[in-house]
Amino acid sequence: MLFRSCAGGLVFCEDSVLILKNEKDEWVLPKGVIRAGDYAREVALRRVKAEAGVEAEILSSVGETNYEFYSVTRKRPVCNQVTWYLMTAGSLQSHFSREDGFVDGGFYPIDQALEMITYSQDRALVNLAAKRYRGFKQGKL
């Protein structure tokens, strides 16, 4: 099994969260692999910018998730460990990257996004991050 460290962002603006739809018709969160010499925070910000065209700012870390899949191109199982960051954007403007395999995406009201997101692990993350984001907005954190 191939083990990869990744980083991603849960990006909020107003009462909306950024999600992306990939070529497999899955609604997901922006993330990418951490390469040698990279910091998780930098990768998360860079992937949010590359995949969705959003300039974001990190507010805090949110946690980690793990998932496994079978890579047809590598012909072996892959385990991704993702470090997640709570982020904020100054604008609802976004544009998904077809070059990175996305067919749709943008900021959606949190309740609507929770219904759209494909994986329960991602929905749980958005729920947790939304509570933390509201705390930041109210000056409680």
Image (cartoon, helix red, strand yellow):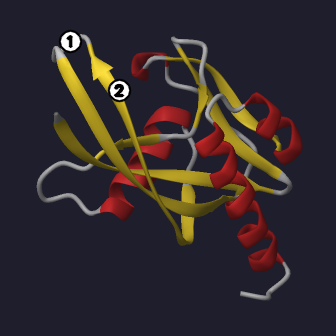
Q: Quadrant of the N terminus?
A: top left
Q: Give the residue displayed 76% in from the left and 29% down from the top.
A: 116
Vertical relation: 90 (above or below) 2 = below
Instruction: Indicate left or right for 37 with 14 as reference.
Output: left
Quadrant of the rendering where the C terminus is positioned: bottom right
What secondary structure is marked by label 1?
loop
Q: Is residue 12 left or right of residue 95?
A: right
Q: Which residue is mark 1?
A: 73
Residue 42 vs residue 131, the one in the foreground: 131
Look at label 2 and name its amino acid.
Answer: Phe
Q: Nearer the viewer, mark 2 or mark 1?
A: 2
Q: CA distance from mark 2 to mark 1?
A: 12 Å
The residue at 75%/45% (across/down) is 92
**Observer-nearest residue: 99 or 8?**
8
* Residue at horizontal 69 percent and vertical 32 percent from the top: 117
Identify which residue, 131 or 53, lies in the foreground. Answer: 131
Q: On the rendered structure, is 33 left or right of 140?
A: left
Residue 103 in view, yes or no: yes
Residue 132 quadrant: bottom right
Would you say 83 lies left or right of 13 here? Answer: left
Q: Position of residue 55 (x, y in %)?
A: 55, 52
**Of residues 28 and 93, the one drawn nearer to the viewer in this rendering:** 28
Which residue was labeled with disc 2?
69
Residue 41: image quadrant is bottom left
Q: Residue 103, position in %: x, y? A: 58, 14
Residue 12 lies, in percent from the top left, at 71, 55
> Which residue is located at x 29 percent, y 39 percent?
79
Crowding at label 1, few (<14), some or many (≥20) Cα neighbours within 10 Å? few
Res 94 seen here: no
Circle 1: residue type: Thr
Numbered disc 2: secondary structure = strand
Outermost residue toward the bottom in this view:
140
